Image (tube, helix red, strand yellow):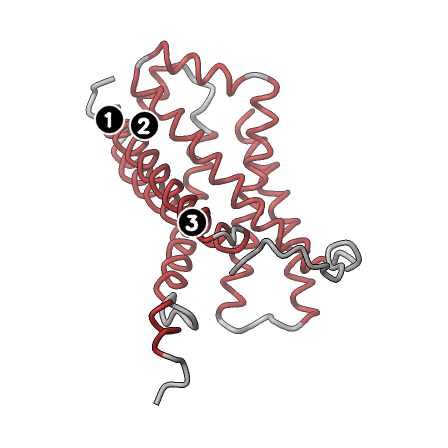
Amino acid sequence: MSQSADRPLSPHLQVYQPQLTSVLSIMHRFAGLCLSIGAIVLAVWLVSAAMGPDAFAAVNGQMGTWYGHILLFLWTLALFYHLCNGIRHLLWDTGSGLDLNTTYVTGYIAVAAAIVLTVVAWVVAFV
Amino acid sequence: MQVRSPLARARGFGAAQNGTSHWWSQRISALALIPLTFWFVFSLVTHVGGDYAATVAWISAPTTVVLLIIYLAVTFYHSQLGLQVVVEDYVHHEWLKLGTRIILQFINVIVAVAAILSVLWISLGGA
């Protein structure tokens, strides 16, 4: 299992044209990683609320800044994208929708649904 | 008779023979997280921006306490399973892989317990 041998590898990421299938797949994983970090932030927020008004004001204040809002928006997008693409994965687990055409259609639907849900959530938040 | 030599079996080469439970747990937690996430996001966005007392009141409501604790537990469980797979995919040095997985497990448990206990603490009026 030695990884120290520096033998040359054939190019893969450098030459393979990105496709909806591969891009959405890695985005699903990337979104999941972002959500894991966001879950820790959520926990920090809850712990600060348990610690009292001062601690809460400090953490909540950071969420309310312009950069806090940007990060929260991106986190919401990651959340809904991971959710919609996750449903797509569960659909594949039942064995259906695995042909290329359906995969592309559901892929576009997942991305569109994620964007729509994110926008709706943020509109509701500010109304 | 087995094709694999006894030494190879002792060293752990070959198929793991388990992993189905991981696959199932990931799917079941994903399924549970679909409605839970919708509840969480839309409950959160209709209550954020309020002051400390309003936030505490929202967290202390019985529905919120129950659903939030379930949401947090399932989220951190699903996250742990996902992170485990990511580490196994990209980290190939045996001890680094094991160490990273252990650290991630510890972080997940600590953060999940902190978050859930905070919710209980708030709802029981300790804040």
Q: Position of residue A69 (x, y in %)?
A: 58, 24
At 47% across and 40% down in the image, what residue appears? A36
Q: Which numbered disc, 2 or 3, marks the residue closer to the eye?
A: 3
Q: Is residue B2 above or below residue B83?
A: below
N-term mark: 3 or 1? 3
Amino acid of disc 1: Ser
The residue where tag 1 is placed is: B123
Amino acid of disc 2: Ile
Q: Between residues B122 and A7, which one lies in front from this camera angle?
A: A7
Report the Cα–Cα distance between label 2 and label 1. 7 Å
Q: Is residue A127 visible?
A: no
Q: Which mark is residue B59?
A: 2
- SS of the residue under disc 1: helix
N-term mark: 2 or 1? 2
At 53% across and 55% down in the image, what residue appears? B89
Q: Callout 1: few (<14), some (14-19), or many (20+) C-alpha neighbours within 10 Å?
A: many
Q: Between residues A32 and B89, which one lies in front from this camera angle?
A: B89
Q: Chain of mark 1?
A: B
The residue where tag 3 is placed is: B95
Q: Does residue A75 appear left or right of residue B94 in this picture?
A: right
Q: Is residue A69 above or below residue B106?
A: above
Which image quadrant for residue A51? Answer: top left
Circles 2 and 3: CB distance less than 8 Å? Answer: no
